[in-house]
């Protein structure tokens, strides 16, 4: 363990040393400033309507470009932001930025649903749905164009607390998605009580879909379950055309993954849109 760490003595930021390190403490204290000092960037990853072979939306994924440590992945700093209570400020920045971009796509005649990730702490904030409503109005984005993703484990940790804000978001017309589905512990009874529109099958079941028969069974059953409950089913982590074909056979609705594109910075995403061979959802400009 130490031997591995000693091989790169100049790298200040090493996730494998992260848990108890001083770097981690420093990052925690710097997170608040990161939002204020514009060190965050929003990347976009396309989502494909499998049957139509047409883009239907994007997921917005936050990046922290730290002035000293460089690129810090969200799996490292989102948990820190949750522990320090900074995640709510981060989410608000993400929502504002995502809706401004959504408005811009709308003005270009592109009808893309825009998905943002929120934390359990956001749903514990009684003002959260009100904030979303105000932002939708400010950016003139139709509520049905916004998707709020919440991980299965976050929502199941305290469904009672999440339910109030989720219901308000649902009444606004915002679409709700259960992220990383299959990695947590939801019961059907709990799932039925939540005003959910979409299940996102975790990429750990999708990456090896063709070589792992268990994954095939899990994906097939989840698609069936989702459809029986009237939900759209999304597969994340789609890296190959062969996996896309199998998902199509299994009746999965939406695919997201490196096969289409990695998450891209705004300019790179615009370039990707301009040259992609997938269909684009055109709408009347206005
Ligand atoms: P997630 O919401 O489940 O996002 C999907 C993750 O899978 C992203 O990682 C994406 O880059 C990655 N991914 C997509 N397609 C593929 C693929 O084909 N193969 C592989 N191997 N990976 C793929 P990313 O961007 O590193 O984000 C990690 C997690 O961090 C997200 O998982 C989400 O839980 C969290 N996160 C990211 N942005 C935000 C945010 O703005 N707010 C909150 N609360 N959490 C965020
Ligand atoms: Mg997500
Ligand atoms: Mg996910
Ligand atoms: Mg995930």
Image: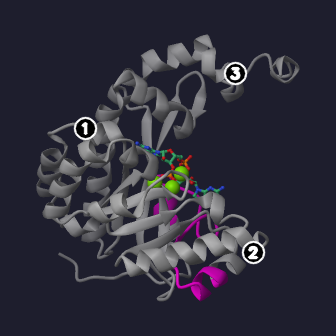
Q: Is residue 171 above or below residue 76?
A: below
Q: Quadrant of residue 32?
A: top left
Calculate the distance from the C-alpha at mark 3 to the C-alpha at mark 2. 34 Å
Residue beneath disc 2: 210
User: Is 257 inside the magenta-drawn segment?
Assistant: yes
Q: How many marks?
A: 3
Residue 205 lies, in percent from the top left, at 64, 63
Q: Badge 1: how crowded within 10 Å, few (<14), some, or many (20+)? A: some
Task: Say which residue appears at 47% left-offset and 26% top-offset.
Answer: 80
Residue 7 lies, in percent from the top left, at 86, 22
Asked if one can make out residue 70 in the rendered structure from this viewpoint, the answer is yes
Mark nearer the N terminus (2 vs 1): 1
Task: Say which residue appears at 58% left-offset and 78% top-offset.
Answer: 220
Asked if one can make out residue 92 in the rendered structure from this viewpoint, the answer is no
Residue beneath disc 3: 17
Q: Is residue 160 above or below residue 67?
A: below
Calculate the distance from the C-alpha at mark 2 to the C-alpha at mark 1. 39 Å
Task: Say which residue appears at 63% left-offset and 79% top-offset.
Answer: 244
Is residue 198 shown left or right of residue 206? left
């Amino acid at each position: 363990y130490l031997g591995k760490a000693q091989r790169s003595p100049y790298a200040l930021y090493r996730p494998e040393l992260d848990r108890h390190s001083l770097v981690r403490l420093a990052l925690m204290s710097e997170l608040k400033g990161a939002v204020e000092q514009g060190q965050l960037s929003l990347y976009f990853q396309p989502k494909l309507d499998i049957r139509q072979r047409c883009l239907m939306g994007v997921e917005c994924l936050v990046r922290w470009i730290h002035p000293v440590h460089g690129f810090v992945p969200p799996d490292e700093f989102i948990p820190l932001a949750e522990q320090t209570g900074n995640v709510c400020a981060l989410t608000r920045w993400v929502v504002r930025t995502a809706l401004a971009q959504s408005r811009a796509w709308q003005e270009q005649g592109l009808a893309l649903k825009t998905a943002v990730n929120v934390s359990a702490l956001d749903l514990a904030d009684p003002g959260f749905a009100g904030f979303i409503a105000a932002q939708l109005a400010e950016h003139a984005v139709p509520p049905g164009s916004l998707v709020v993703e919440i991980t299965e484990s976050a929502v199941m940790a305290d469904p009672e607390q999440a339910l109030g804000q989720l219901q308000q978001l649902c009444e606004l017309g915002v679409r709700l998605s259960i992220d990383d589905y299959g990695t947590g512990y939801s019961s059907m009874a709990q799932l039925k009580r939540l005003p959910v529109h979409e299940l996102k099958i975790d990429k750990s079941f999708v990456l090896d879909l063709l070589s792992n028969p268990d994954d095939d069974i899990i994906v097939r059953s989840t698609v069936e379950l989702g459809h029986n409950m009237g939900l759209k089913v999304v597969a994340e982590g789609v890296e190959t055309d062969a996996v896309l074909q199998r998902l199509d056979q299994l009746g999965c609705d939406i695919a997201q993954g490196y096969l289409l594109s990695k998450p891209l910075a705004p300019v790179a995403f615009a370039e990707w849109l301009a040259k992609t061979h997938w269909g684009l959802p055109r709408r009347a400009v206005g």
